[in-house]
Amino acid sequence: MTGSPRLLDGKRCGDALKTDIATQAAAVKAMRGRAPHLAAVLVGNDGASKTYVEAKVKACGTVGFRSSLIRLPETITEEELLARVRSLNADPDLDGFIVQLPLPAHIDADRVLQAIDPQKDVDGFHPQNVGNMVLGLPGFLPATPSGICELLKFYHIETAGKHCVVVGRSNIVGTPVSILLSRNAYPGNCTVTLAHSRTKDLPSITEQADILVVAIGKPGFITGDMVKEGAVVVDVGIHRIPDATKKNGFRLEGDVDYGSVRDRCSAITPVPGGVGPMTITSLLLNTLKAAH
Ligand code: GUN
């Protein structure tokens, strides 16, 4: 492609949606006497998780939500964490909550996620919400996949009949995004290929993609030669790369090698400022829905 690709700006899209969320939050507050309230549980001291959770809590303030950050020690036992989840389930002042992943290795994350009341599961990770998503029934959609859909919608990206290749099959992103984009809806109606670490000859698959969603967790993994001319590229990865030329000592990079891909694609999500802000906005949308 000649010229620069269109930037799918998640900050711009997220800010537009947040204006509407703030209006609705004020209406909820007027009606019920209290604002929507989200709690985030952070176990341990993982630096990246702390950054993400703080960003989620901060975003609540920008739309007039109440928020609570619950920090628990790395050494907490699974039973203690489960008890905490049960008390959050029972708290009538709380509309929704999340338990930030990953959890320490001694805790079974599936058990914890299954203990969350599906009506307060604003991350959409409980099996009941996952099942509802697969069947197209009402429920909470996971934040990153639904944020990607909102972003495609905001930029009027055509999806019907397109070949969408998703790289990465995680429960949080790859698998649900493959389901949402194959649904009979907009955005959706894609023919979806879900590629992963055991896919043979990955470049021969990715170069067929009209829409390429990359959530593989490896910096710069997708290079220009793997991308079809004119493709729409959604980069879910975010990595801190040590960089002595930066004031804070690192730069942020996605799963896509932006330098070589930018000349081939027609549109791309930047890192940072693409999918990240959309994940947070979707979490706010789910919390508003829980409050309703
Ligand atoms: N870890 C990475 N992404 C997410 C997310 O969307 N929610 C939670 N709870 N943990 C995460």
Image (tube, rainbow, N blue to C red):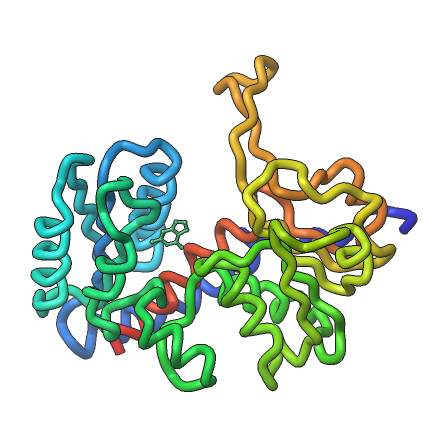
x%, y% of residue 19? 43, 63
Query: Residue drawn 27% across and 32% down?
Result: 45
Depth check: give the residue in front, 278 or 200: 200
Q: Quadrant of residue 266?
A: bottom right
Depth check: give the residue in front, 183 or 66: 183
Q: How many marks?
A: 0
Query: Residue drawn 61% across and 54% down?
Result: 196
x%, y% of residue 20? 43, 69
Query: Is 289 left, or right, of 94 in this rendering?
Result: right
Q: Quadrant of residue 55?
A: top left
x%, y% of residue 197? 61, 50
x%, y% of residue 121? 28, 67
Extreme-right residue of the structure? 2
- Compared with 57, 132 (above or below) is below
Q: From where the camera sits, is residue 76 visible?
A: yes
Query: Is 232 left, or right, of 99 in this rendering?
Result: right
Q: From where the camera sits, is residue 65 visible?
A: no
Q: Specify the quadrant that holds the C terminus.
A: bottom left
Query: Residue drawn 31% across and 49% down?
Result: 100
Query: Residue drawn 81% across and 55% down?
Result: 204
Extreme-top residue of the structure? 244
Query: Is 88 left, or right, of 249 in this rendering?
Result: left
Depth check: give the residue in front, 281 or 111: 111
